Structures are given as C-alpha cells and as structure tokens.
Amino acid sequence: MSDNYRSREERRRAMNDNKPEGKSQGKPKKKKKGGLFRKIVAAVLLIGIIGLIAGVGTFFAMISDAPKVDDSVLKNSFSSKVYANDGKTVVKEIGAQKRTYVQYDEIPQVVKNAFIATEDVRFYKHHGVDFYRIGGALMANFKDGFGAEGGSTITQQVVKNSFLSPKKTVKRKVQEMWLAYQLERKYSKQQILEMYLNKIYFASGEVYGIERAAEKFYGVKSVKDLTLDEAAMLAGLPKAPTTYNPVTNPENATKRRNTVLNLMAKNGFITQAEADKAKQVDVQAHLAKQTESTSKYDVFIDQVIEEVKKKTDADPFSAGLEIYTTLDTNAQDYVDDVMNNKVVNFPNDKFQAGLVVVDNETGGIQAIGGGRNRVSGGLNFATNMRRQPGSTIKPILDYGPAIENLKWSTGQPLKDEEYHYSNGTPIRNFGRNYKGWVSAREALGRSLNIPALKAFQATGADKAKEFATGLGLKLDEEDGEAYSESYSIGGFRTGVTPLQMAGAYSAFANEGMYNAPHTVTKVKFPDGTEIDLTPKPKRAMQDYTAFMMTDMMKSVVNESYGTARAVRTPGLEIAGKTGTSNFSAAEKQRYNIPDAGEKDVWFNGFTPNYTISVWTGYETAKDGYILSPNETGMAKNIFKHVITHISEGKPKGSFKQPDSVVERSVEKPTGKDLKRPSGSTPSSLITKEYFVRGTAPTKVSQTFVKKEKEEKKEDKKEDKKEKKDNKDVKPKITASYSGGAISVNWSASNAASDTTFTVTMSSPNGSEQLASGAGAGGKTISNPAPGATYSFTVTTNTGQSASSSVKVPDSSDQATEDNSTKPEDDGTTNDNQNEDNSNTDQNNGSDQGDDSSTQPDDNQNSNNGNNSGGNNSGNTDNNNNDSGNANDGNSGNNNNNNGGTTPPPADNGGSDSGSQTPQTPATPSTPSTPATPQQEPTTEN
C-alpha cells in the first residue's frame, strides 16, 4: 500500500500540490469597514477623558484655596483705610456706619422685581451660576470686546463682594462660581437676595443698602414707601452710581430708569402701560433735599471710592481694604479754604467753582475743589459737572493738532478776517473786529475765533479727534454726535469737567506724555493681595508739539495782548488758556440775562510741576450769570492763589526746549509765508518763533529792502525839492524910526509852514538876539540912542537872510536931517528886490518912491520942509508881510493926527505871533526930543 498516504493530512497536501496554477483557490477575505473612524473616536474619547481628568484636577486645584462661606462675612462689613500720598497718614477710615439692614419680608415686591429684572432675570431658575447668561455674555464679549457684558448672577455678586479679591483672572472666576454654588446650597434665594440688597453701593457719602438709599434719595421712612418709578431708579444706580445719580446727572438718570422699566415690562413684572406711566414722572420730582454736609476730605474720598469700585469691583466700605492715594493734604486743605471763602471773596453764595490740581509727571490728583456749600452726595463741580470749555479747547482741537500733523510753527501766519463756517454760518471774534495777519501765537494769546477755526479746518476733524482722544477727551462719544467745526471754539453739547481738562493740559507740561488723572495708586486686600492702579503713561503728542504749544500758552500770560496777564506770579513759569461760554438766546430771554452775561469762565494753567483747571459759574441759569469784573476774573484769581501756595518751598523748574525744536528770528506776518528779516527790517517788526527742526524759513524778506530803495529814491526827490524850495524862500526885514522908537518887522515870501526866523540886532551896546521862532513877526525898540545906527538881520532855517538898518537922528538935526535906512548886503540874491533899495528924501519933503511893497501908489502928500500938519497918507504900512499875516499892535503903523504930531506907539512888550523870545531890555535913550519928520523905511531881502 505504497500508494496509500500515511495520513489524511498528507493526502490533503498532495491534492493541493496537484492543483493547476493560476486557478482560484477560493474567495479572499473582506477587510472590516470603519476601522479608521473607530480609531479617531477612540482617540477623541481618550483625549476627552484625559482632558476631563486634567480639568477636574485643575478645577479642584483652583478651588482648593477658596475661602469658606462665612456667615459673619456675608452679613457684616469691614472698614477700609484711606492713606495720603506719603503712604503713612490715614486720612479716613470708611465703613458701614451708614448702613441700615432690612429684612427680606420688609422689602416690597416692586423693589425685588426691579433688581431681579435688571441684574439677574433668571435668579429663581439657576443654582448660583447661569450658564445661559454666561453664553450670552461670551457672545457679547466676542462681538464687542472683552468686558462688554458680564455674566455674573446676583449670587455671584454677593460672593465677589464678600469673599474674593477683584482680580479678573480665571482662577478667581472659577472660585466665584464654586462659592456661588456653595452659597445656593446653604442659603435660600430669599436670604441671598436680602444679603445683596443690604450690601449694594448706591452713592457717595457712604450710601449702602436699599433702606439707606431710599432714605437718602427720597426721604422715605421705609423702603416700603417707594413707588415704581423710584424703585426703578434705585435698581439702575449700582451699575454706575455717579453717572446715573439723579441729583447730579438727571439726564443720564432718566435714561437709566427708563431702561429698568422696559426690562421689567419685557420680563412680565409690570405691564407696558405701567412702565409708560412711570416714565412720565420727572426723575427729580420726588427727590429729597440734600442737607447732610460733607466732612474733611470727603470730596477727594468720593473720587477714591469711585475709582476703587470701577477698577477693582471691590466694595471699599465692607472689604477691609488699605487704599493708597495721591492726596496732598496741604494742597487739599488750602483748596478747601478757597472754597470756604477764606482766600478769595466770592460775589454771592450761589456762585460756584470747581478745580482739580494734578501732578504733571505722574497724573496724580493732589487736591479737588468740588464746589461751595456742598452737601454729601451733591454735585461735584470738579469731577461730575460738564460745561462747554470755550476757548480752552483751542490748544487741544485747533493748534495742537496743526503743530503735531502739519508741523506749524508758533509764528504760523493766519489771517483774522470776516469768515464763516463751511455751511455758510458766520463766525465772529468776541470783540467783533479783525486783526488781519497774525501769528498762531498771537491768535491764541488774543483768543481769536477765526484763526482757530482755520487751524481746525487745516488739520481736519479726524486728526483733531485723534489728538483729543489721546488726551482723554472722547467728546463725540459722550455727546453722541460727530465732530463739527463748532468744536473748534468749544461749541459742543455735553461739555467737559475740570478733571478732564487738568489731565489733558498736564500732557503739554509733561513733554507730550499723558497720564490719566487718578486718586488711587494701589489697593491692598485682607489676604495680602495688592493691585497697582497707577495708570501707565502714554505718548499723546510729539515733544515738539508739547513744547511749542506750551510756549504759545506762555504768551497768553506774559504778552501785553494776552488774556491771562492777571495770573503772572514772580518766580513761576506759567502757561495756560482762558475760556468763556455764553447763554443760549432762549436762556437769555427766559431769565432776563444781558448780552454781556457769561455762563462759564475757565482758566486752565500749568507750571513745570502742576496743572490746575478752574471752572467758575452758576449751577443753573436761574441762579445767576457772570458779569462783574470780580466774577469774570475769579477763575484766574483762584488759580493764582492755589498755584502760588502749592509751589512754595519746592523747586520751580522750567519748560525745557527739546532737540526737535529750533528758534529763529522772522519778520512778523504780513502774508501767508514767514521769512527771515533783512538788514532793512525794522527791529519792531522782527520777532522770534519756534519751528520743528528742518522747517524754519530760509528765504530773506525783500519787503523792507524794496521799501528802503524806494524811500531813498523818494528822499532824493524830497532833498532836491527842499533845496529848490529853500532857494525860493525870500526873507524880508524892515526897520524904521518914529516917535522915539524903532519898529522892526520881518517876513518871507514862499515860506513853508515850518520856516523859522532868527532876528539879531547890532547897536552901540553890542549884538543881541531879538527873536527866534516860526512865522513872521515884529519888535519895537524903545528909546534908542540918538545919533546911533541900529542894524537888524533876519535869518531863516533854510539859510537865507536879509538885513535892514536905521539911524536915530541927533537932537540937533532932528528937524531937518533926512534919516533913511540903507540895506546891507547879505550876499544873497532876491528876485523880488526893488531896483532902487533906497528912498530919496527931497528937500521939499515930497516922497516919490515907487516901492509898492512899502507904500501906496499916488497917495503922497507934499511936505515943504516942515510938518505942516494935515493928513499924511504916505505913512509906512508896517504890515509888510508877503505871506499875508497881519501884524496888529506893532508901532510900525504911524497914524498922523490933525494936530500935526505923531504920538509914540504903545509898547506891546514885543509880543507877536512870530516871536518866541522875551522882549529885550530897552536901549537907554536920551530925554525926548521934538517930533522929527517921518522916515520912510527901506527893505532888503
């Protein structure tokens, strides 16, 4: 049986080996589907399990050191200490002394519903954490940015305010959620709501808890007495107690109250009709009169509390904090004295003021003047009151952006002229006049509106907005309107506060670095946690902008045209800007306010160390208006007193010029381009201005070079004309003897109005000056010496002269001798000189001269050698003035009387229109002699 196989196995093998190759040996096995997917799922599950384990581990690690839920902490409060800027002095300890605890059953349902609708509408449905709300908050934060909406329930808020630090970390949030869950397990919803309503902060002045808030705002004895509109208002306050305070911010408060009413109606707590009815109630209609006065440092500490709550979410009145502030007690005490009428004299009790003092380098607020006669929780005129800033906005919206973006110089030419806004509305200066071409420096110093608008237009609204935002002023966001050209002179709706303006101006003094003004530097929590709250400095502008704007604002104080000269203080370098705003036409008509009445008066000023913003005015238009010099100058007066006090004993410092700025001499603007002065530019028209390095002008002005050439050419013409005119001046002088006296008269033809004469006389007693001055004139020489010859010379300021002489007759020949005057040659030529300068005295006494300038024609009387009497019409007319000037009163007019004798002329003391020198003493004379024949004078020019 050799063919037999030893076993069945061998037989099977043999059979397989004998099968033909290539034939199928059966169907192949199919691969299992879904293997890769199962692997992915398994991997995900594994990662999930690992993540869950890690998450759970992380969660328990985070909550491991969470505080325990403590009943005493939930219902009791721990006071906080507030320190001054030295870090040691405790200025106040704030706590729960003004808190009234109220039980859940005593709180009306309308109040509970108002808060639940506003703060946590699913309060009765969740277990401490509302994941639906958290999801909504995450979506809002993703859409609008982190912090846009919170997801905390009322339970979480109780936990946060009672047990945790305000650090916004994942760990703190996890602990908050864990403790909220624990709190819900331990306490009922009613107990948690009761805790919440008794711990919540409502207003400055340590107003905590719903009972205390009801009493503070509405004067009710119990929270049970609150109406729907009042409950809605109180429910809206915790979100922002200062912003929505109905006492100080009624407009914002109304909006917030109406929002709460809408939420109550939306969530079914009230009907829409009830909501609408409550909206009709004036938000201030039921407010109680605020009478509680403030205590020391309360104004400053109110701002501290506001900052701590805003930046940390902690409750300063119950969290047991140590709060370190920037308060300078010396500065604050002095500011309080100012507000209390101990430093300046306010015009009346209703006149208000608000001021903020800021350290330029840090932005720390040193002192706050919140107002006069303030009550606790009342309007703070330094931090809450918003008013139009007037011209104090010009460095921020007009000239600052122009220097920053266009690199304008301090001398940038701007034409102050009749002008209008882009929409055609006219714009005017305060004085209703125009200055023509002025520099940017002078335009700011004079507070001109038209150049300010032109600067705003040159830069553009977007750049102006960007510049202002960098200085902490988000004007359009607060006003709800876009930047318009009226912003350039402070014409926007909501306004600004002294706190904001002090912060903005301090950046100019701090080389362009902006530090947000603040009162708190750090907060320490009971567990030892510290939070630094000091704002980080930001560059708001280039150093050249800061320096050049500062120098322009120094001109507001130092220059003769500056509007703030009153704040000049010896030893202090001060820069700043004034500003005023007006009432509307409706306000003027309603309250009978005169056109000159002003609504707000500001002064924002700074030294290298400190910035102070001061506002003055009245709370409402019905309280009054600013008109008197004491009122209009009060802001500057307050600034000067405060800056002087806080600067005592401290280094004064100075504003340092950066390397990016150069100073150059330029001609004062006469056109759109600045130019360097030429050698011909008058010194009075040369000024020094600052330029961004590389932008100073290089062209030399030719204005006065051309003028100088033209003036020289004109001077030559004038000189030539003057020489000709001087040559044409022909002086004349006459001298005659009659009645024992010599009459002298002088004049000149072609004389100008400024021609002057000097008259001298030569006599036996020597030479002397008779007269000197402008215009023609005359003199009388009484009692001359007999037989002597008197010579007279007149000289003009143009160099021409003329002479005349007369001989006094001796006593022996007075009756017969012809005494004639003879001309003397002065070396000049007179075109009008008579051909015959001497008059011949004929023996028969007949005068036949033809000099029409000295005697009338054809009117001679015959004189037969003796005085036969009669009417001698040949008398000399001494009014021999070619310029037409009469010489009344002089003795040269000889009138013959019928008696045949000529009386001596009256001595007028030499007074005449052409003489400016006293009458010379009379020449000694001999006793009077018989009358002599009249002598006819001879003139020589």
Image (tube, rainbow, N blue to C red):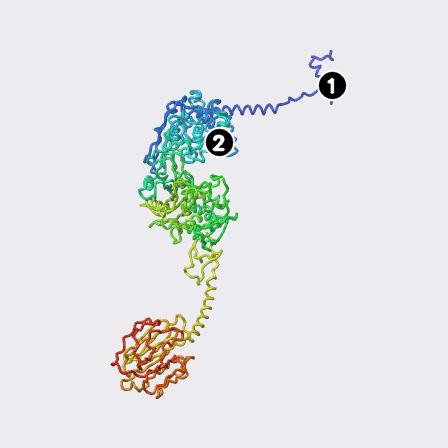
Q: What residue is shown at x 40% (from left), y 26% (from top)?
A: 223
Q: Marks 2 and 1, how far apart in space?
A: 85 Å
At label 2, counting other C-alpha atoms closer than 10 Å, the crowd grade (few under 14, some 14-19, many 20 or more) is some
Quadrant of the rendering where the C terminus is positioned: bottom left
Can residue 239 be seen by looking at this rendering? yes
Residue at the extreme bottom: 843
> Does residue 724 sit above or below 337 in this rendering?
below
Residue at the extreme left: 927
> Does residue 879 sit above or below 8 in this rendering?
below
The one of 579 and 650 positioned closer to us in this rendering: 579
The one of 106 and 541 positioned closer to us in this rendering: 106
Q: Amino acid at mark 2?
A: Glu
The circle on residue 344 is none
The one of 836 and 556 positioned closer to us in this rendering: 836
At label 1, counting other C-alpha atoms closer than 10 Å, the crowd grade (few under 14, some 14-19, many 20 or more) is few
- Picture coordinates of residue 451 (x, y %)? 47, 51
Describe the element under mark 2 as helix, strand or loop.
loop
Residue 195 figure quarter: top left
Q: Amino acid at mark 1?
A: Asn
- Picture coordinates of residue 680 (x, y %)? 44, 63
Instruction: Identify the residue under disc 1.
Output: 18
Q: Give the mark, 2 or 1, whose residue is nearer the N terminus.
A: 1
> Does residue 268 sit above or below 768 in this rendering?
above
Describe the element under mark 1 as helix, strand or loop.
loop
- Picture coordinates of residue 106 (x, y %)? 40, 22
Residue at the extreme right: 20
- Picture coordinates of residue 887 (x, y %)? 36, 74
Instruction: Identify the residue under disc 2.
Output: 149
Q: Is residue 817 left or right of residue 237?
A: left
Quadrant of the rendering where the N terminus is positioned: top right
